[in-house]
Structure formats: C-alpha cells, structure tokens
Image: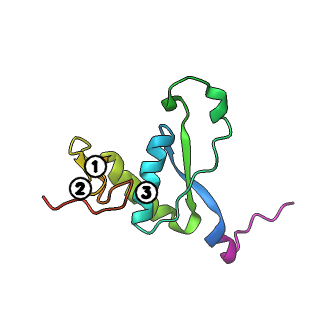
Amino acid sequence: MADTTLHVGTLMTQKVIAYYAANPIEAELVIGLLQTKGISAAVNSNSSAGGIGELPADVLETAIQVPVSQLSAAREIINDYETANHSNEWFCQNCQEKNPGSFEFCWSCQTPQPSQ
C-alpha cells in the first residue's frame, strides 16, 4: 500500500492546479495577477501546443499551478478576477498595454493602475 501522507516539507513544494485558463494568453494574465499578490503561480509547458497548428490560441486550455499552501488564497484572487467587471479595461501609462479592469497592476510591466 502506497504512503499517501502529505509531509509538511512537501506542502511548500507540491503544486496543484488552481485554474484552467481559456488559453495561454489568459494564463499569463492570471499568473501576473497572482504573482502581484504574492502567489507563486506557473504553468507547465504546453507540450501539445505544437500540435494545434494554425488553430486559434483559445483551443488550448492552460492549467495554472500554485503551491498547495497558497491554493486557498489563489482561488480567492481568481474568483475576484472571474467576477470582476471586465468592461473597465485600462491602458498602462508606462507601456500602453491594455489590462482587464480587475488588474491592479499592468500585466506587462507591473506598473500600478492609475487612481480614478
């Protein structure tokens, strides 16, 4: 019988899927949001990405992983992201990139959203 006990040291390094982004672009946006909140988020390489050929990027759902110890906090942030009013997009004053209204920092350069 296999040992299924989760040891305390493993808790800090074991990663679990916190969110399935619609595509790699959204995954990078959500990872940036999580990282600005102190969450260690990442994606494993999409080994099937080469197989999609010329299909649109949104056919490749992308899993975002976080440490088990940060899963609860990550899900709260992701829930806020999903329920936020995305019609309030804003443009970064530093790099001119468009950002979802739920982002407090630019996804590209991490410049804070200007006060309204």
Q: Alpha-carbon neighbours of circle 1 within 10 Å: few (<14), some, or many (≥20)?
A: few
Q: Mark 3 belongs to which amino acid?
A: Gly
Q: Earlier in the sequence, mark 2 or mark 3?
A: 3
Seen as rendered, the residue at the extreme right is 1
Seen as rendered, the residue at the extreme bottom is 8
| Residue that numbered label 1 is attached to | 96
- The span shown in magenta is 1-10
**Above or below for 11 versus 30:** below
**Above or below for 57 versus 69:** above
Magenta stretch holds residue 109:
no
Image coords of residue 70 (percent x, y): 51, 66
Relative to residue 45, is residue 64 drawn left or right?
A: left
**Pointer 2 and pointer 1: residues touching (CB < 8 Å)?**
yes
Q: Mark 2 belongs to which amino acid?
A: Gln
Q: Quadrant of the C terminus?
A: bottom left
| Residue that numbered label 2 is attached to | 93
Q: Label 2 to label 1, Cα distance in Å? A: 6 Å
- Residue at position x 51%, y 31% from top? 57
Secondary element at tag 2: loop
Image coords of residue 65 (percent x, y): 57, 55
Q: Which mark is residue 32?
A: 3
Q: Mark 1 belongs to which amino acid?
A: Gln
